[in-house]
Image: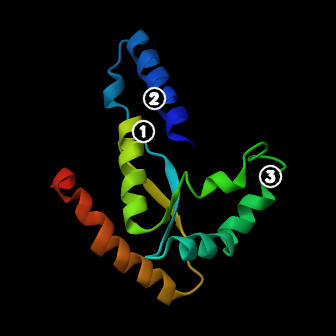
Amino acid sequence: MPTDRLASGVRRLHAYAAEAGRDGAAIEVAPQLVLCVDRDPERAVERFTASQAYEHLVSLRKSTLKGIELGSYTSQNLIGTPEQIIERVNRLAEAGATQLAGMIVVANTTDEMREQMRIFAAEVLPAFAEESA
């Protein structure tokens, strides 16, 4: 989901909550995302587009993802370098996301999974350490 659409949805959610006498800020907004991190941005995209996760998305083009441009999927998920992912997380937070769920980590082998986990832990998580402390 593009961040402008997320922000619009969060504003509507908060308005609906206020109409119901609830505090909209108390409602968690947790987009579910695909994670594919690599120090080389092209390699991250290549890894993603060669994955079973991507093939699954292609299979959904006639139903759930009807009308969605798959090319935009890479820019709307956590796919890219650590710096790109940090930027994306910050944009999602500005749009109103309160938590993020990396539902699918793109990896074809356990070594690839470990490599991504190491990069994510060493280079992405520290950017948000103060917020979680």
Contact between labelled residues 2 and 3, with CB atoms less than 8 Å apart: no
Q: Label 2: few (<14), some or many (≥20) within 10 Å? A: many
The residue lying at 80 percent from left, 60 percent from top is 59
Nearest to the eye among marks 3 and 1: give it: 3
Q: Which residue is mark 3?
A: 61
The Cα–Cα distance between marks 2 and 1, rounded to whole angstroms, is 8 Å
Name the residue carrying label 1: 29
Q: Residue at x 47, y 60 (%)?
A: 102
Distance of label 3 from label 1 (alpha carbons) = 25 Å
Q: Hey, what amino acid is under mark 3?
A: Arg
Left or right of 70? Residue 128 is left
- Decide which of 29, 8 is in the foreground and name it: 8
Q: Is residue 101 left or right of residue 59?
A: left
Q: Do callouts 2 and 1 mark residues in contact (Cβ within 8 Å)?
A: yes
Q: Is residue 67 above or below residue 120?
A: above
Image disc number at residue 10 = 2
Classify mark 3: residues with Cα within 10 Å, few (<14), some (14-19) or many (20+). some
Mark found first going from the N terminus, 2 or 1: 2
Q: Which of the image's four quarters has the N terminus?
A: top right
Q: Residue at x 35, y 48 (%)?
A: 90
* Numbered circle sitting on residue 98: none
Is tag 3's residue or tag 1's residue first in the polypeptide sequence?
Answer: 1
75 to 42, vertically: above or below = above
Distance from disc 3 to disc 2, alpha carbons, whole Å, reads: 26 Å
Under circle 1, the secondary element is loop
Q: Examine the rendered structure and indicate whether residue 8 appears above or below residue 38.
A: above
